[in-house]
Amino acid sequence: MRKTYLLLSSLLFCSLFVTDAHAASQQGTVAPVPPQVIVPTSSKDKQGNTLEKSMAYVKTLQVKNGKLLVSLDYVQWFFGEAAVKAYRQDHPSEKEDYPMPYYIRNSSPKIRTFEVSPKASFTLQTNSTQKDGNFHWNEAVNTDTFKKFVLSKGIPYQIPFHVEVKNGIITKVTEQYVP
């Protein structure tokens, strides 16, 4: 019974994903597809700035001394075959096939809090829909719209965001579409 459920849920997911991608491609926009593996990275640019890129859940939003602070819980994102491999590593006793095309690993309880730059860019995937019911993919929004979006979903919000940080200040936040 469980195998039948997993097979049906996988087929349903694939049909919805293909239908969405086909419909979006006719409009010239497609849901963004992430790389196979996303893990937090840190580097220095030529000017000596510390650049961090990660995928994270938003845990809290607060305004303190006129500055927006966001607390993040970093996660690792796996897609396609990498998702199956990571799932198997984390659940070695599970005998069923892993039905999803993505897997999110949250192995660290550490919460990081960052100030958000007043010039930060925000991109949402599921904030609004077009007349035909499809999402407005890669919708650029302002800080207030981002805050309202996250708060309307409830905190802690369990949809991952791609986050870019420069010298400890968030400069870019992009919602990762999760079917």
Image: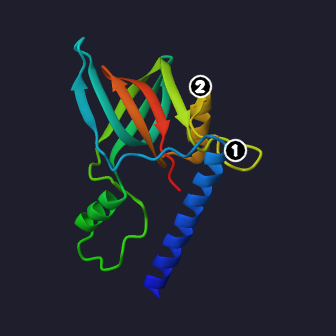
Tell me if mark 2 has few (under 14), some (14-19) or many (20+) residues whose alpha carbon lies within 10 angstroms of its own: few
Figure check: 68 above or below 160: above
Secondary structure beneath dot 2 equals: loop
The Cα atoms of the two marked residues, 2 and 1, are separated by 17 Å
Residue at 61% over, 54% down: 22
Figure check: 123 above or below 8: above
Quarter-wise, where is residue 28 in the image?
A: top right
Q: Which mark is residue 116?
A: none
Image spot of residue 175 (x, y percent): 50, 40
Q: What residue is pinned by disc 1?
A: 129
* Number of marks drawn: 2
**Given the image, on which type of amino acid does mark 2 rest?**
Asn
Quarter-wise, where is residue 38 in the image?
A: top left
Q: What residue is pinned by disc 2?
A: 142
Image spot of residue 71 (x, y percent): 40, 35
Task: Please report contact status of discs 2 and 1: CB closer than 8 Å, yes or no.
Answer: no
Residue at 27% over, 63% down: 85
Residue at 47% over, 88% down: 1
Position of 160 with respect to 8 (left or right) is left
**Given the image, on which type of amino acid does mark 1 rest?**
Thr
Image spot of residue 78 (x, y percent): 34, 53
Residue at 23% over, 14% down: 46
